[in-house]
Amino acid sequence: MPLCAGNFRTHLLGACFLVPFVRGKEVEEAPTANLTCRELGVLRLLTRGLSNRLIARSLEISEKTVKNHLSSIYPKIGAADRTQAALYAHRMGLTESGKGTSPASPPIAASPADPTLTACERGVLRLLTRGLSNRLIARRLDISEKTVKNHLSSIYSKIGAADRTQAALYAHRVGLAA
């Protein structure tokens, strides 16, 4: 559990501040220390694959506020988009259970050994987890952008994902992430 989410936090104007010492020993700040508690909350919900609208409902804030938080989060963690941000949060253990899954996570319909995903679909999914756009995936695999979109539609259907963020989180959970 990150320090900001544990017993070592202090709330001051909605921000998290880490206590620099625990039992006389200096503590290394968590990589998320520069995020406010609200931003951490948005990031945790993002790892569940929720849309901005559902994040807003869950936190009782506006959808625009969620977008503003995400715009603030991306540069702080070095992410270019929500998929990269969700994968970052997953790697940092910011999911509710700390293991990368939560009760509201998209269902896992296929396993890495399950042959329902073709080799091409697995390749597209691996590149998607790196945060590449459809255009860059197409260039890397030497296929058309339309073919990438078709593969993604098939992947979403097979694994029960609604969007690329959920698909990337699925790939990470089952070991298909590059």
Image (cartoon, rainbow, N blue to C red):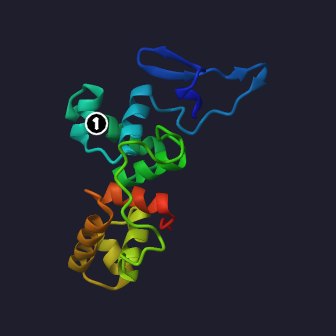
**Which quadrant is home to the N terminus?**
top right
Q: Is residue 81 something that shows in the picture?
A: no
Q: Quadrant of residue 123?
A: bottom left
Inspect the image, locate mark 1, and give the three-letter code of the amino acid beneath it.
Ile
Q: Nearer the viewer, residue 118 or 110?
A: 110
| Residue 116 coordinates in the image, percent (x, y) | 36, 76
| Residue 64 coordinates in the image, percent (x, y) | 21, 34
Residue assigned mark 1: 55
Residue in view at x 57 percent, y 34 percent: 2
| Residue 52 coordinates in the image, percent (x, y) | 25, 41
Residue in view at x 47 percent, y 32 percent: 35
Residue in view at x 68 percent, y 33 percent: 28
Dot 1: few (<14), some (14–19), or many (≥20) neighbours within 10 Å? Answer: many
Q: Secondary structure at mark 1?
A: helix
Q: Quadrant of residue 58?
A: top left
Question: Residue 19 vs residue 15: left or right?
Answer: right
Residue farthest bottom in this picture? 142
Q: Looking at the image, is 173 positioned above or below residue 97?
A: below
Q: How many marks?
A: 1
Q: Is residue 60 something that shows in the picture?
A: yes
Q: Looking at the image, is 4 positioned above or below residue 123?
A: above
